[in-house]
Image (cartoon, rainbow, N blue to C red):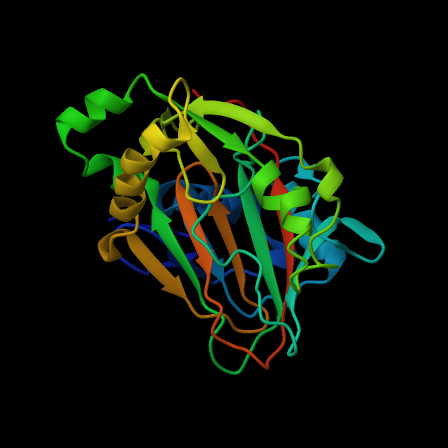
């Protein structure tokens, strides 16, 4: 077990997720940030509570990690284009992020990570699930690992954020915007070597992956469905219960997440900041 001298760390499950305490993110020290980065790499998603940052302070914390990605498809907090809004009003039925996914895999340089800041949460429900793609890969058979090692996946934003979504006219209209900008397509290795940790991770997801490069969608579906089922085994996951002032920061290269939509009639308001990444190998 790793000992930390400037922060307190509480793992949430056997494979993913840790809460970090003993730090004020408004006054984070270099020593604390160094240890927080270690925890982030080890657990894939980190959580903080009772932080209550202003929009300016959210941006300052995010920029410690890298360049901020200006979201194409979410509405932004007024006056703060770097902060995307993830919201659901009491009269709305559909939430954002309600299926297993990881963010921005449709980009040629997928996002390094995403930070979610809780500003208003329902009295019950509205949790977020996370799953470890390190654990998902490590528990595959040697034969399947060998099959996947030279395969590539096709990812796209078109079917999620494009005109076909807009034409459904569901109640995400106004929260999801710019369907005409959903023209991103990318090809990534099915198994990546994480650029910081050096560990191998499964890099496909049910929302943005269309199929395998060189395979038709129909041919790809059976194997992808197996991988999706395998990757969400309970032992690979953790569940986070939000409170106002809570923060989650997940690694898009090594995790999936899913926002549970079980709080109809209640408001949930989050600020999201995404950090740019690099090409994956």
Q: Residue at x 64, y 62 (%)?
A: 170
Whether residue 14 can be seen here = no
Q: Residue at x 80, y 52 (%)?
A: 80
Residue 80 or residue 128, whichever sits in front: 128
Whether residue 198 can be seen here = yes
Q: Residue at x 57, y 31 (%)?
A: 277
Name the spot of residue 54 as percent of width and height, x first. 73, 62
Q: Quarter of the image holding residue 258?
A: bottom left
Residue 131 or residue 264, whichever sits in front: 264
Q: Residue furthest left?
A: 142
Q: Residue at x 28, y 20 (%)?
A: 149
Q: Residue furthest right?
A: 79
In the image, 130: left or right of 3?
right
Name the spot of residue 155 as percent of width and height, x first. 50, 31
Q: Quarter of the image holding residue 174?
A: bottom right
Name the spot of residue 150 as percent of width and height, x first. 31, 16
Q: How many numbered marks have been drawn onto this rendered protein structure?
A: 0
In the image, 233: left or right of 279?
left
Taking 276 as reference, is 116 above or below it?
below
């Amino acid at each position: 077990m790793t000992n930390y001298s400037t922060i307190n760390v509480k793992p949430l499950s056997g494979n993913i997720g840790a809460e970090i305490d003993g730090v004020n993110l408004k006054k984070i020290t270099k020593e604390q940030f160094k240890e927080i980065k270690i925890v982030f790499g080890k657990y894939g998603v980190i959580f903080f509570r009772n932080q209550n940052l202003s929009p300016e302070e959210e941006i300052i914390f995010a920029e410690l990690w890298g360049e901020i990605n200006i979201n194409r498809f979410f509405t932004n907090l007024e006056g703060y284009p770097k902060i995307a809004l993830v919201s659901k009003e009491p009269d709305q039925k559909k939430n954002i992020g309600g299926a297993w996914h990881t963010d921005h895999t449709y980009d040629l340089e997928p996002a390094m990570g995403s930070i979610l800041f809780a500003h208003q949460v329902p009295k019950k429900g509205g949790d977020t699930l996370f799953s470890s793609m390190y654990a998902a890969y490590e528990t595959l058979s040697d034969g399947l690992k060998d099959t996947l090692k030279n395969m590539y996946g096709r990812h796209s934003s078109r079917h999620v954020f494009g005109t076909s979504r807009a034409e459904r006219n569901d109640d995400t209209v106004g929260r999801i915007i710019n369907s005409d900008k959903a023209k991103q397509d990318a090809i990534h290795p099915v198994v990546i070597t994480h650029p910081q940790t050096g560990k191998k991770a499964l890099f496909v997801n049910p929302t943005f992956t269309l199929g395998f490069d060189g395979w038709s969608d129909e041919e790809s579906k059976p194997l992808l469905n197996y991988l999706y089922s395998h990757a969400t085994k309970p032992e690979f996951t953790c569940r986070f219960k939000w409170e106002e002032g809570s923060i989650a920061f997940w690694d898009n290269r090594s995790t999936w997440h899913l926002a549970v939509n079980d709080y109809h009639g209640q408001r949930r308001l989050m600020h999201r900041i995404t950090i740019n990444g690099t090409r994956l190998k």
